[in-house]
Image (cartoon, grey):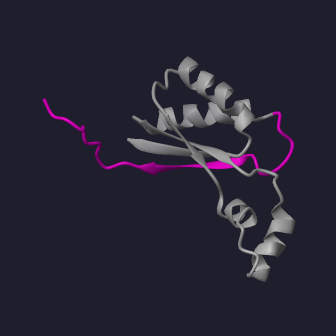
């Protein structure tokens, strides 16, 4: 089993990704509101640290918030299928900073309640 994590800065593509998952028989995912460290620093009220104000000028509000999607998939083929869905959905974006994704192997999944 694998967990696929997707940090999506271009949140307008979220629904298309989830639709692609459903069409590809990827039946479950969790979506969290998230914010990157740079954005959190740039949007902080801390004026005392010069680095923060410099970062604020550099970063601005390009992607103040993002969505983090994670899903548990049975095998590497399903991970590749999910990655393919995401890459197809965002293929028309020409700018950098869309987001990133990574997978990690899972040793075991535990049910919350045993019957």
Rendering coords of residue 26 (x, y %)? 49, 26
Q: Quadrant of the C terminus?
A: top left
Q: In the displayed structure, does residue 86 sit left or right of residue 90?
A: left
Rendering coords of residue 38 (x, y %)? 71, 64
Q: Determine the image quadrant of residue 86.
A: top right
| Residue found at the far left of this picture | 115
Q: Determine the image quadrant of residue 81.
A: top right
Q: Residue at x 19, y 35 (%)?
A: 113
Residue toward you, 39 or 111: 39
Residue toward you, 29 or 81: 29
Q: Which residue is drawn at 56% across and 25% down?
A: 21
Q: Which residue is drawn at 65% across and 26% down?
A: 15
Q: How many labels does the image show?
A: 0
Q: In the displayed structure, does residue 57 sit left or right of residue 48?
A: right
Rendering coords of residue 105 (x, y %)? 41, 50
* Magenta extent: 92-115
Residue 45 in the image: above or below residue 13: below
Residue toward you, 37 or 19: 37
Instruction: Inspect the magenta stretch and tell me whether residue 83 lies in it.
Output: no
Q: In which quarter of the image is the N terminus?
A: top left
| Residue found at the far top of this picture | 23
Q: Residue at x 75, y 46 (%)?
A: 98
Rendering coords of residue 70 (x, y %)? 50, 41
Instruction: Inspect the magenta stretch and tell me whether residue 112 lies in it.
Output: yes
Q: Is the magenta stretch mostly helix, strand or loop?
A: loop
Q: In the displayed structure, does residue 64 sit left or right of residue 5?
A: right
Residue 97 in the image: above or below residue 84: below
């Amino acid at each position: 089993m694998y967990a696929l994590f997707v940090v999506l800065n271009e949140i307008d593509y979220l629904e298309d990704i989830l639709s692609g998952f459903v069409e590809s028989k990827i039946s479950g995912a969790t979506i969290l509101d998230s914010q990157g460290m740079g954005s959190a620093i740039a949007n902080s009220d801390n004026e005392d640290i010069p680095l923060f104000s410099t970062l604020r000028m550099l970063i601005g509000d390009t992607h103040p918030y993002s969505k983090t999607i994670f899903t548990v998939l049975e095998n590497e083929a399903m991970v590749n299928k999910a990655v393919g869905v995401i890459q197809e959905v965002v293929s028309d974006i020409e700018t950098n900073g869309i987001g990133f994704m990574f997978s990690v192997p899972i040793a075991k999944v535990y049910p919350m309640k045993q019957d």
